[in-house]
Each structure stands twice: as structure tokens, then as C-alpha cells.
Image (cartoon, rainbow, N blue to C red):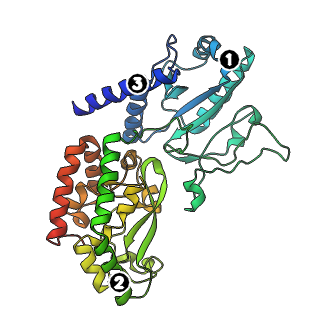
Amino acid sequence: MIVHTRRQRDSFLQRLFSFFRGKAAPELPDVLQNEQFRHLLEKERFRADRRKIEFCLVELLIEPAQQERLQTLCAAFRSRLRISDEIGWLDERLCVLMADTPGDAGCKVANELIELAASINISLRAKVFVYPDKQYNWEDFMRSPKSAAIESTRDDKHDDQHDDNQHDDDRCDGQPSLEPAFENAQLSEYVVGEAQPLRFCEPVSIVKRTFDFVASTGALLVFSPLFLGTALAIKCTSKGPVLFRQKREGKDGRTFTIYKFRTMIDGAEEIQKKYVHLNEQSGPAFKIKDDPRLTRLGKILRKTCIDELPQLINVLRGEMSLVGPRPLPVHESKACLPWQRRRLEVLPGMTCIWQLRGGREVDFDEWMRMDLEYIRKRGLWYDLCLLWSTASVAIFARGSV
């Protein structure tokens, strides 16, 4: 009931914003509106996760001057598409959803739609997205590489350029071309950028963002003496930097740098492979109780959760929230199953259900289910309850070591 009410509210706000922008999607015969199409897309994702099958979504890019011919174009497409394929609007973009369709077949259909549009004098480009992730060699599928622009994300190599959502354009030959073609493109359900059609993530609510901003600002001011004392203690008891920085994967699959007070010896990540055999966590996560790399002070900081306080900076910057699924290191997050990656639909947080129900003692799959439980129940009051419970864990030093 709460989810249904939230969707109605978001749908109303979206229609309201579209009205003021003057860009409401036109109503066409046999073309689903945004809310219907988004629901169908979400349903297909659950089905793909359960049956371990692929599906494709093709975004159609049409010149503004030819928008008035959309009805003719959609009618022509119906003659080519299967009965099970659906045409609809997704955030004011015309898309085709092809269920039970692998990436190679989706690319062939996209190319045929481009040629079909050209036969009725309509200029068309397409962006093809495949769920879940998979590698494809586009040269095997595209008969006319210059007639279609296939937008994709590349393996990010965990550098700062990925944070700026930059992509490399590979030309299909040595000559300049107006239409880029990509080789060995990686298509992802979490394609970052304005033109991403496969976006399952909802925007952060104004109420949550306002609460996070005000609360993190106040907490940074209140805890500033504790920050200073902790920094001095770390410097005096072990070699290395005060803050630990690590790339994590957050909302929409965007990578960001997380900040924590250093609780391990300097260079702990480099020697992690030595302790793989001690890993006590299932799945791709790496967790060791009483980790031998921990410093004496680090154990105290973890017990009292003081090591997490620098993440208030991440909250202030909008990369994290006070409450939300804990962000995983990039390599661990990318190793998650598709259903587990649904946790990336919301901002990661400093605390969540997992921390309060056993932490390291919880099986990885159960941890992921707890994160999905939070996504279903999330709301300001629920966040306040989790924050109150987290405060008691910190006060009585019941944090995980």
C-alpha cells in the first residue's frame, strides 16, 4: 500500500513537471505511457532475474522535426515486432522492450528498425541496452555501423574519469564520422548519464535529501572535537594516513570515494590476498572477525562506530545517505547477482538493517535481502527508527570488529 501510494505521488509529480516543461509524451495508439511501460520493465527485470534470461530495451532517437510522424513510425514497427514486444514512453523517450531476447538478436532488430524507418524517409538512431550485463562484439551484428549509434558504458578501471561519466568513442574506420560505433561494448542495466533508458533507480526525495544535508552538517559541527582527537590518536599510534579512502559503488552504479578513519595497518588492502583463506563471509564480500590487520586503536574505533563518522562528508556531498544499504567495494559490488544489485536503486547509507541484525554474522544473501527490505519500507520515520537503534549500538560499543 505504501509503495503504491509512493508511485502514485511520483507519477503525479512527473506529470506536473512535464506539464511545466511542455514536454509531455504524446499519446499514440498501442504505445504505452511512462507509468505503464516502467511497470512492465520492472516486471520483466524480476522475470529475468528469476529465470536467468536476457532481455533488450531499444531507445529510439528521432529528429525533433520528424516527431509529428511518430504514429506512422510506430505503425511500421508493429509490422516487424513480435506480439510480445512492447513500444512505450520511458521518461519521454520512445523505447521498445523485447522480452526473452539476447543481445545479438536485440541489435539485429534495432538495425532492422533503423532500415525500416529509412524506407519511409525517417531518420532514426538507436541505443541498445541488455539486461543483465554481457559483452558483445557489435561488428558481428551491425550491418550498417554508421547508421546507428550504440551507447554503452565501459569497464571503468576505477579512476576519476568514470565519476565524470566519460566514455571513449571508437571509430569504425580511420575516417571522421558523425555517428560513432563501438566495438566490444559493455551494455549495463546501470548506464550512467542523461540518456540512460534502463533506469530502475528513483530520484532521491527532497525530504530525504534535506534531512541528510541538515543532519550531516549539524553532526560534523558537533563531532568536530571528536574528529580532531581521533585523528591525533591514529597519528600517534600507527604509521599511515588518518583517513582510509576506497572506491565504492553507489546509486545508479556510480563510483565514489568513501571516507573512514583508518582502523588497519597502512597498506592493508595490498596484503588482503594473504588472508583470503580466513574469509568468513559468503558471496563476493570479504569479512574476517578479529582481522589481523586491525590496529589496537582500530578495534576500539570499530566497536564504537567512530570509524564511520567521516562518511558524513559523503552524505553532505550527496554520495551517501544517513540510512541506506552499505556501499560495497566496486569489485565486490560488480560480482553481485542481478537481483542483489537492486540495492543500487537507492543512495547507500552509513547504517541500515544489516548493521542492527548481526552484521558480519549474517549470510551474504540474507544481507542483500535486508537491503531490499529497507528499499521496500524506506521512509523518513523508518530512517529515524534505524538511526536511533544505531545510536544505541555506538553508545554501548556493540559494533562489529
Identify the mark nearer the N-term, 2 or 1.
1
Image quadrant containing the N terminus: top left
- What is the spatial separation of the Cα atoms under label 2 and label 3, in whole angstroms? 53 Å
Identify the mark nearer the N-term, 3 or 1.
3
Tell me the SS state at disc 1.
Answer: helix
Task: Where is residue 142? Give x, y as percent.
Answer: 71, 35
Tell me the SS state at disc 3.
Answer: helix
Q: Who is closer to the viewer here, 20 or 249?
A: 20
Label 3, on which residue? 35
Label 1, on which residue? 66
Left or right: residue 49 compared with residue 168:
left
Residue contact between numbered discs 2 and 3, judged by CB atoms under 8 Å: no
Residue at screen point 31% across, 28% down: 9
- What is the spatial separation of the Cα atoms under label 2 and label 1, in whole angstroms? 65 Å
Label 2, on which residue? 232
- What is the spatial separation of the Cα atoms under label 3 and label 1, in whole angstroms? 25 Å
Q: On screen, 252 above or below 360?
A: above
Badge 1 density bin: few <14, some 14–19, many ≥20, Cα 10 Å: few
Of the residues shown, which amino acid type is indicated by label 2?
Answer: Leu
- Quarter occupied by residue 378: top left
Left or right: residue 189 compared with residue 383:
right
Q: On screen, 350 above or below 305?
A: above
Task: Where is residue 27? Give x, y as percent.
Answer: 50, 13
Identify the mark nearer the N-term, 2 or 3.
3
| Residue 116 seen anywhere in this rendered image of the structure | yes
Left or right: residue 306 compared with residue 101:
left
